[in-house]
Image (cartoon, rainbow, N blue to C red):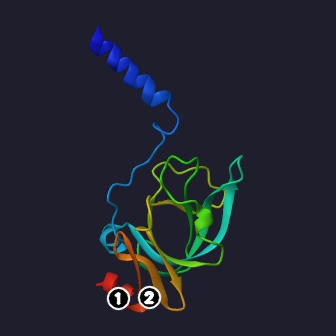
Amino acid sequence: MYISSLRLLLVVWICFVPGFAMACTCGTGASFSAVAPKAPVLAHARVLQHDKETPNGTFVRMTIEVIDPIRGAAKAEKLIVWGENYGSSCRPYVSSFPVNSEWLFVIEPELIPRQNELQLRQFTIGPCGGAYWLKVENGYVYGRIFQADKNSEMKLAKLMRRFRK
């Protein structure tokens, strides 16, 4: 009886305590260089737009255009990338990637593609703190290139050569 009561209490706790069931954990994290070699899609891209607004005003997807593909995409291809939706997926909000900004993205196919009036391939950006994207500006990349807990910078061309090997 005591064990059954504890199990029931645990189920109730997980289901009804705000934040507990929805919280995400990222573990120790990883660097961009650690996740990029295994990525199905790795590309330098520009953010074209944000859309699919939630009732609270948050945009949950963005359309990107590939500038320079390394793997899994074609030059000038437009792709949909889904970000955080309701605070439970640990992905970044697409507003973190301003329209017209450029990034080096590691993205993965959306497991269950959603209705897509644009007829574009759909992807998700990885969770947690910058291992799946690097800011591109003035010929450099910025972010967690080699260490999960330290930002650095590097010439974009040099990093692109490294991943093309």
Three-letter residue code for mark 1: Arg
Residue 23 x/y as whole percent: 46, 44
In the figure, 96 relative to 65: above or below?
above
Q: Residues within 10 Å of mark 2 (few under 14, many from 20)?
A: many
Query: Which quadrant is home to the N terminus?
Result: top left
Q: Quadrant of residue 102?
A: bottom right
Instruction: Report the residue at 50% width, 31% height from top.
Output: 17
Instruction: Report the residue at 45% width, 23% height from top.
Output: 12
In the figure, 100 relative to 82: above or below?
below
Q: Earlier in the sequence, mark 2 or mark 1?
A: 2
Residue furthest top in the image: 1
Instruction: Report the residue at 47% width, 88% height from top.
Output: 140
- Label 1 element class: helix
Q: Quadrant of residue 78?
A: bottom right
In the figure, 10 relative to 133: above or below?
above
Query: Which quadrant is home to the C terminus?
Result: bottom left
Labels in figure, total: 2
Foreground: 143 or 108? 143
Instruction: Report the residue at 65% width, 78% height from top.
Output: 100
- Label 2 element class: helix
Q: In the rendering, which numbered label is found on residue 161?
A: 1
Residue to which mark 2 is pinned: 156
Foreground: 77 or 148? 148
